[in-house]
Structures are given as structure tokens and as C-alpha cells.
Amino acid sequence: MTSFDSSPAPAVWRALLALAVVFMMLATTGWTAIRDQGGPRTALAAELAGWRKARIGAEALPAPDAAPTRLAAFFAAIGSARGKRLATDFPHVVGNLNGAPVALRYRANRHALAESLAAERRRVADADLTADGHHEAVRRMHRFQALMEPDRQILSFDPTGPGRVAEVFGDLDRAERVSVIVPGVDTNLLTFQKTARKYTAPVGMAQSLYASERAAAPRTRTAVIAWADYTSPVGVGMDSAIGRLAEDGAVRLGALTEALPGNSKIALFCHSYGSVVCGVAARRLPARVEDIAVAGSPGMRAESVAELGTTARVWATRDGDDWIQDVPHLAVGGLGHGEDPVTPEFGARIVSAERAIGHAGYFEPGTESVRNFAEIGVGSYEDISCAGDTDTCRSGIYGEDADQRA
């Protein structure tokens, strides 16, 4: 008589055990759960409904998800005055339109932030709000106030739920090289910028990278985008071990890179779960994305650089005390993100992260990691320091890309 064992196969048990280790590591290393922050949920939806009905003369407005080239042509055709009117009437829409003029998006997002700030002030004054609700409303109010400071350039803004936002440092319209920072887990409006541990948040990361790029190449026109314009996983949970949110984020990242103005060369700097987003996005990115650098990566949902399907150079780094090195890199049944990008088998160019400390220390000023990121961002590949005191990470760059050195 044949017996049937209904228990999971050994490979499945190993996968489940590995995932248990992942979650334990996350739980003991400061990846805190941040619950849905609530907040305005109707402003964008209401504006979208109005946008679909609006006309300029007899012409309907283009679909918000139209190709960036179509949107750029539309705004060029209607002129500055009408564009500003649309930014005032539909700030949540115009502020997030890939293809709209950058300055117009900044203008629209100031209007959207002002509306959101007014809404939060009303919430703060609501006597029926719970203590937790009041605390959260005060935090959001302070965040909106900070984002509205005169020198800030907000490229995208959506206060829905935990919120999404992107900010530009430098002159994006005139930049020869643009760097985009793609952050990881628990990134939202309230964690976009921090006072304590400044360089662990997207704004601090971008400020540090921008300063390093200017020091590395003072004559090169650069811009850096702190890009928190995707919904990241919240704390410890299944979303951090699967690719669902990375898939959505990859679509948004691809749209951003397609829409950046001019013909600047683009480099992506992807931290932790952000490297999963970059890995998923890799094959759909435009050719102007010439470099993808990952730090503290749990995997890129690929087993090798070749599997990423990109022509971009792929760089990776991890410091010696980053706990993520102890997390099993696997991909079983949609769980896990695949091979470790710093292994020789993966095939990335491995750069030094000397003086970086821990999983969140890669953008600290004075670290080799942020200096190397800056050299990548400005295209000074000969000045990059490889891991292990070798020159292997620079091997073949100018032989393969001789036309780029000129």
C-alpha cells in the first residue's frame, strides 16, 4: 500500500525557514512598523474627475497617464499662462504629471501642499479626534509646513494614506547628470526627512549625495532626486518578502526616468528594498539610465546582471557589519528576491563601503560608499574605489564604452 506524505517538501521547508530568519532579522534591527497614516483621500480623486471634464476651448485635456512626450507637447502648446491656471485649478494632478514642465510641477505641488496643510490644521483643531489621531495630524501638519519652505523643489506629492513625495536638489532642467535615490521599507511622508539619523532618510541621502557630486565634479551640472514616490512595504510583513509593491514601484520609476527633461544621463542609487524596485524596473528603463547602484540589497529579483535585461552598468556594495548579509538570498514561489548582488556569481561591479556603519549608513558623509556613489553619478569611473583594494569594479568600462569617455 502506498502512503502519501502531505508535509511540505524539503525545499519548501528550507524556504519557510529562510523567510523566518528574514522576518526575525527585520524585527531585531530597527525596521519599525508604521501604520497607515490616514489623511486626505479624496483631493486627487476629485481633481481627476474634474480634469476629465475640463476643456481648453473645444479640446479635452490629455489623460493623466498619457506618454510624457504627449504631455510635454500639450503644455508647450497651451503656453505658460494656461499652464499656471491648470496648476492652480488641478494642483494634485499637474504636480504629478510626468511630462509637465518641472517648474510648473513645483508650482502645482506648492498649491497641493497648501491645501493639505489647511486640511491638517482643521484636523488638529477637531475636538473629537483621538489622541493618536491628533498626534498624527500634528506630525503631518509639520511635514507639510517643512515641504513648503521657499527653497524646496517638490517634484511629486500625494498625501493619500501614508503619502508619496519626491524632491529635487539642483537644477533638473539644466542638469547634465541626474541621480535618483530609491529608498526602501517604511518610506512615506513622515519618514521622508529626519532630524535624528538624518542620512538614513531620503532627503538626507539626497543632500549628502548632491554635496559629494558637487565636490567630485564642480563643473558638471548635476541634480539629485529624493524619490519616495512609490508605496513601500510597511514594517515587518509579507510585502517586504515578495515583489508586489516593487512591481508597482518599478512602473512609477520607469515613468519618472522616461519623463526627465533634456538629455541628461541618469544613475539610480537603490537602497535595501529600493534595490528590489530597481531590479524589477531594470529592463523597462530608457537607455539614458546608464548606471544602477545598489546598497544593502536583499536581492534584485534576478540571479545575475544578465537576467536584469539592462544595458546599464550595475554596481553593488555592502559594508561589513550590515545585518542583511546574514539574510538568506532566495527566490521560491514568489518569496524572496534572488541572488545576493555582491556575490561574484551575480556579476555586479563591487565598490567599497569603507567607513559606512550598519544597514542604513551608506549615505553618511565621509564614507567611501557615498563618495563612490558620487563618482558614479558624475561619470568619474576612474576615481571609484573597488571593494577589496582591487581595480576589478572598473574593469572594461572605457573599453566597452569608449564613446562615453570623450
Image: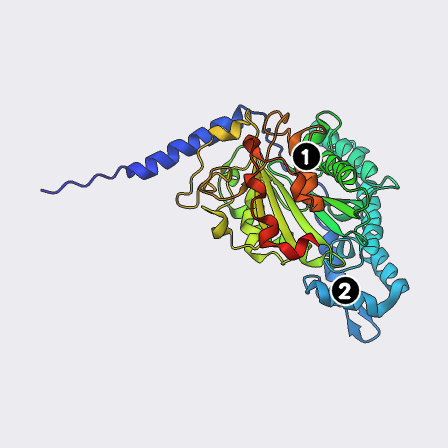
Residue 267: % across, % down = 66, 48
Q: Where is residue 122 in the image (x, y as percent from the top left)?
A: 82, 38
Name which residue lies at 42% across and 43% down: 331
- The N terminus lies in quadrant: top left
* Quadrant the C terminus occupies: bottom right
Disc number at residue 106?
none
Whether residue 142 is visible here, answered yes or no, is yes
Residue 405 horizontal side relative to residue 106, left or right: left
Residue indicated by mark 1: 370
Label 1 CA crowd tier, 10 Å (few <14, some 14–19, many 20+): many
Which of 268/90 is in front? 268
Q: Which residue lies furthest to the left in this view?
A: 1
**Do the residues bearing badges 1 and 2 touch, measured as CB atoms within 8 Å?**
no
In the rendered image, which quarter is residue 125 located in? top right
Q: How crowded is mark 2: few (under 14 residues within 10 Å), some or many (20 or more)?
A: some
Which quadrant of the view contains residue 320? top right
Tag 2 or tag 1, which sits nearer the N-term? 2
**From this viewpoint, is residue 181 visible?**
no
Residue carrying label 2:
72
In the image, 229 versus 118, the foreground residue is 229
Q: Which amino acid does label 2 sit on?
A: Ala
Query: Taking 312 as reference, is 367 left or right?
Result: right
Element at badge 2? helix
Q: In which quarter of the image is residue 317?
A: top right
- Look at 73% across and 50% down and name the residue there: 177
Residue type at mark 1: give it.
Val
Residue occupying image coordinates x 84% and y 41%: 148
Location of residue 367 in the rendering, given as x and y in whole percent from the top left corner? 67, 29
Colour approach in the figure: rainbow
Identify which residue, 240 or 356, lies in the foreground.
356
